[in-house]
Image (cartoon, coloured by chain):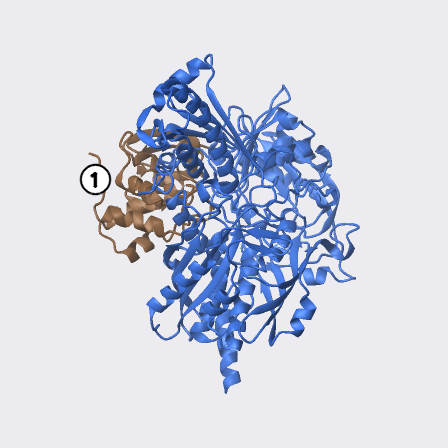
Chain colours: A blue, B brown
Amino acid sequence: MSKYSVIGTRVHRVDGPEKVTGNAKYTFDLVLPGMLYGKVLRSPHPHAKILKIDTRKAKRLIGVKAVITGKDTLGRKQGIWRRFPELCDEEILCREKVRYIGDPVAAVAAIDEDTAEEALDLIEVEYEPLPAVFDPLEAIKEEAPQVHDGVELNINVTRHIEWGDVDEAFKKCDHIREDQYKLCSQAHVCMETHDAVVSYDYGGKMTVWTSTQSSYYIQRLMADMTGLREGDIRVIKPTTGGGFGSKFELDSAQFCAAILSMKLCKPVKIVLNREEEFTATKRRTPMYYFLKLGAKKDGTLLAKEVRVITEGGAYTAMGATALYLTGFFSSFPYKYPNYRFDGYRAYTNTATTSAMRGFGAPQSTFVGESQLDMMAEDLGIDPIEIRRKNGMTPNYEVPGQAYIQSCGLHQCLDKIDAHIKERGKLPPNHGIGVSAYGFMSGGIFNWFDTPYAFSAAIVRINIDGKVDLFTGACEIGQGSDTTLSMICAEELGVKLEDIRIHAADTGICPVDLGAWGSRTTLMNGNAVKMAAADAKRQLLEFAAAKMGPNIVYDFDIKDQWIHLADRPERGISYFDIVKEAIRGKDGETIIGRGHYTPHRKGMISPAYSFGVQAAEVAVDPETGRYKLVNVTTAHESGTVINPVGIEGQLEGAIMMAGGYGYCEDQPMDEGKILNPSIADYKLIRSLDMPETEILEIDTYEPEGPFGAKEAGEGLTNPTAGAIGNAVYKAVGVRINDLPITPEKVLRALKEKQKKSK
Amino acid sequence: MKKGLRLTVNGQPYELYIKPKTLLVEVLRDHLGLTGTKRGCDSSSCGACTVMLNGMAVRSCSVLALQANGGEVLTVEGLAKGNELNSLQKAFLDYGAFQCGFCTSGMLMSATALLNENPKPTKEQIKEGIDGNICRCTGYNSIIRAVTAVVKGEYKEAK
């Protein structure tokens, strides 16, 4: 029997009944009395000077209440990397220059959406088009147009990571491979597009309802940009229709609605349409990858050298973090004694690239796992074996970078090895490819420069024993409201239905940095556990006083029963003690507080999850088309808090990461995204979805709540690499630029045929 | 120049006065306040706005409300009987067949239409039945498991 009553059990999501009845209210559904509707006018040019904006006609249209341009703002620039002012480079409403097709130049508030749309057509903007640059390799040339003044060679951020003596180590290698890759973009495609309702009142207070991954970031950035005090801005996250990395920066819907509302003292709602969502929000970072890998004959990896140039797009956003993380995770999940990474992020006149689920690691995992398979083949070693030989183990230090405590990589490799053997001899043109990965449980870096703890929670126990849990954590669909409620219930010894969570409302919840970097379960989970423990301790003091046992006994609470830890039958009802404790505290409710910030855990993350995935494909060599037959994942994420949640994360990640490998792309012509609709942007649908199997490995992470660590983003890392390796196993061709489309497979097959003739 | 529209939604008759270009989804969401039906693309390709019109699943973003004149519409709000969830809703809860929930209403309506037409679909037919609905969170397999559970009779419908 499990020692836990709540965690590890299969429960209904706490937001479930509202969601399956259509009753959950998203920002998209909100209507306030007197609310106006806003629309944003965007640049049709990839790069241009704004000479003049004439809004007079638009303002005269009946039903239009306000038209704003960059002149109506404080003219400030913002960004997530607040510690570095030069990286806060996005005005949102451009004043002098536009830098990509979709850059906002004006916004309108009107009585309805149709009128606002009509008004956009009446705004006259005079542009002076400038030469533009779209490819990062072009952007870093001497003669390239400058996207931002004063930024030499358009290089926005550089990153260097190094340990050991790479050059010396390469001399000792028996075999060295050098390979190049080109990685495509990917759109988040949240089902709920970016949207916001902002209400600024006559008292100078602002309330923002918005679909976001971080209420706190939006509050802080909105304060930076409007000049309001942080405390005068209340950000409330209603039910949110997906994030995947796209929703923790201040966006045009939030900012334009805020400026319009400040002008009018009326609520303004802006919902981006699907085309804006594809063209004018952030996206996954395309990268050029240059890899050099050196090994001994026996497969021991001695050195790796990585050079990356990323397409930054117009602004910094979280792209600087993606650059850093792709550099760090290029060393994963192996023990390289010598490693060097040099990364460059170049500004281009394209839509900004930033965070997306996996955050640089899906890129590094695809290229790394592809190259490792090739290395194994060159050396005549089994792909599983080379991973076993070099894979990370518990209590490993990535030199000067990170400390890995729990690590179940080798058990995962064993499970996948057994799985492949079980599949036996495959039919012709079928292949199974393997890919191993690791990922962080939240970032330690604080480029946002928050003075607050990274996560915090408050637990309040009411007279009837019901528990209110307040936390800034953001439920965006990943299940954090459920997981955190489970942690709270377990620690406090009550039932899940005793907990009511109040989350992501900056007016009532303590700060949490938000749902990104796979951080919520570990970081916010620790804060919730600490808050629950604090409240529990207060109850136990009363219980001890009331029961008066020998001082050597410890108390605990389980299933609403407060008892002696070693003598569970000697106890007292939780509900009785709550009543007496509140009376004993002169009527004050029981309040517990908790907070968490990682300390002394290296530079990246307090903990890492690991896994190995095997993808089976069936290729039709006549057409290059292939089917994803089965994707099996051996996975460890420490103690499993919410098993239904993990299964959902895993299968959902396969849809998204499989799409990254298989079909998703954002082709462009002169900076214009050519497929900005769900009809044209190819996603994995139910008929394309492979069978999925999960092989859960037990590990325990000392740093995590009840031993838990991340189980969200990391799962996005392996699939593209596994697909690439599977296609190679099936028909013997390698595609080094994502996505691996049938056209590319067919072309490669034809070239291979030609060569063999 | 507004026109009259008669419509029964979830058993409740309505008479409205609307602009001819008003879409069915706009009538449901904006006029009747039935915001369970979502809009994800406005190009008839994501399925979030799926409702049933006269027993058939339709994309309510691609149907003019006047085309539905005199018709009977069932939306996600009409699935539960009072406060008792129906079988599909219960199965979605049990099998974790949703995460962010934004596609869920449309997904439930497509699955309802499928089961009305074919109470014993195969796994492949279930996949086909929901192929027009995009879910960015779950990877579909939990949805297929939930529908399969209903098909197998794991749930009893409330009377």
Q: Nearer the viewer, residue A68 or A619?
A: A619
- Whether A422 is drawn above or below A475: the answer is below
Quarter-of-image position of residue A425: bottom left
Q: Residue at x 30, y 58 (%)?
A: B124
Q: Residue furthest bottom?
A: A757
Does the image show residue A180?
yes
Q: Position of residue A700 (x, y in %)?
A: 45, 48
Amino acid type of the residue tagged 1 in the rendering: Lys
- Name the chain letter of the residue that bears numbered label 1: B
Q: Residue furthest top?
A: A586
Q: Secondary structure at mark 1?
A: loop
Tally of marks: 1
Q: Position of residue A252 (x, y in %)?
A: 61, 40
Judged left or right of residue A348, residue A659 is left
Judged left or right of residue A400, residue A520 is left
Q: Are there few (<14), some (14-19), or many (20+) residues within 10 Å of tag 1?
A: few
Q: Nearer the viewer, residue B124 or A38?
A: B124
Judged left or right of residue A713, residue A53 is right
Q: Position of residue A663 (x, y in %)?
A: 48, 61
Quarter-of-image position of residue A224: top right
Pointer 1 residue: B156
